[in-house]
Amino acid sequence: MEIKAPRGTSDVLPEKAAIWDYLESKVVDIFTNFGYKKIILPVFEHTEIFQRGIGQSTDIVQKEMYTFEDKGGRSLTLRPEGTASVVRSFIENKMWNNPLPVKLYYIGPMFRYERPQSGRYREFWQMGAEALGSDDPFLDVEMIILLMDYFRSLKLNKLELKINSMGCSKCQPAYTGDLKKFIEPNLEKICKQCQKRYEKNPLRIFDCKNKECQKIYGDAPKLTDYLCQECKMHFDQVKDALTENNEDFEVDKSLVRGFDYYTKTTFEICSPVLGAQNAIGGGGRYDGLIESYGGPPNPGIGFALGIERMILAMQAEERMPGPKRINDVFVVSVDKDSRPEVFKLLMELRRSGISAEMDFAERSLRSQMKQADKKKAEYALILGPDEIKSGVCTIKDLINGTQENIKRNKVLEYLLKKKRVNERKN
Ligand code: AMP
């Protein structure tokens, strides 16, 4: 048996996991400022939730879902995205009784059976936000600015914002009719899957990655030219508010994104420093989705960003946060007999809120000092028989190399004071 994580998955080792914590702490700050509250959702749902929400003819439902039968014979699916679950929860928990819009965010792993490559995995993490119960165009703009502000808080500067409108159930049929007319003479030339898409849901042809198909679709009619009065006004208001808030954007008329539920505004943010998989976040409005599940008609809008891809963009833009000192103190024992006293001091420090480590392999003094450095401690506290006898402790500042002796009963006070000063400096 090969000891290896399944294809398309990987471990997030401690050093990288610390960056994830940093990204999450930024989400908490910024999303909370915008009025979004955290929701924790199940990792799997009834398969139907995704089939109905994302759409039967989408690539995700057709090819990419991890679906299995549980021991009770239910068909369940590991979530490929978060919106369907949020909507299911909105209906199940009758959230429409809360002041609207209900604004939520989530963080967690998603699963899609895709062909893995750089920036594309089978298990990947998303942070997403959803606002349910309002069709105000300002909410669309709030969402877009939230996503942009979040990226900017990570000092990502090379961002391209694309927006489009998918229209609504009133304007889509006329468009779909004309799109079919456009495809018809090319039916022989497009790929087998697009031929199926043509039959079932012509809009999905734009998801096709085939170069030949893409070339043909370049001249296809554009949905934005078919918008009804209401959708046009909505789109104009979104564009105006983005401009008034100094948000640069480009209207990309072929931005349809891979989900059937979108109506009106869709948006995507790309990082030009990344390769083929350069979309780091995206979303859109889904005004008919709640109703399609049998819930009371309530519009909604949301987005998701991919953590792994965002980290790739941070690496490419050289915006990764530097390694942090993760321990305040490393307690060093001069000899074996000093270890019980060292262990006692270690516990005392930790219980007082100071992060502390010691050696668990009876290493020499020299190699404990090396350990202290490797563990990224700020101070080494050295205890040996002499120190124990005279009730003192040697404290070495590992950043600037200075060393002093202080009374054992003053150690805590000393360190807490240093820590407060450092926290103020940061
Ligand atoms: P989507 O849910 O498809 O709109 O994707 C939202 C974001 O999730 C994308 O912009 C990517 O950053 C990320 N993402 C989507 N699929 C994958 C994947 N297979 N691997 C890694 N990140 C992904």
Image (cartoon, rainbow, N blue to C red):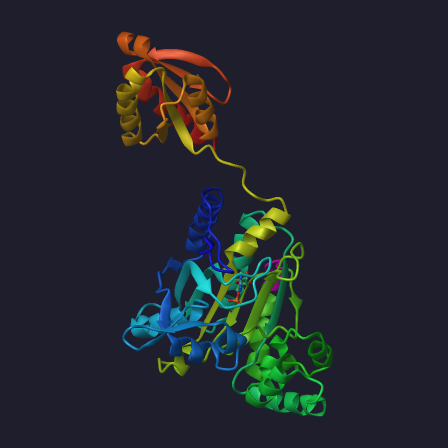
Quick check: is 343 in the magenta stretch? no
Nearer the observer, 351 or 34: 351
Q: Position of residue 291 (x, y in %)?
A: 40, 81
Q: Residue at x 43, y 34 (%)?
A: 326
The stretch of residues the image draws in magenta is 242-247
Quadrant placement of the N terminus: bottom left
Does 273 appear above or below 242? above
Residue drawn at x 31%, y 22% is 412
Query: Image quadrant of residue 365?
Result: top left
Instruction: Locate residue 262 relative to residue 364 in the image: left or right.
Output: right
Residue 189 visible somewhere in the drawing: yes
Q: Is residue 342 above or below residue 119?
A: above
The one of 374 and 422 positioned closer to us in this rendering:
374
Residue at 39% over, 79% down: 48
Residue 349: image x %, image y %?
30, 27
Q: Of 15 and 134, which appears nearest the observer?
A: 15
Q: Position of residue 248 (x, y in %)?
A: 65, 60
* Relative depth, front residue between 206 and 243: 206
Q: Quadrant of residue 71?
A: bottom left
Q: Quadrant of residue 294?
A: bottom left
The count of marks equals 0
Q: Where is residue 131 in the image (x, y as percent from the top left)?
A: 43, 67
The stretch drawn in magenta includes residue 245:
yes
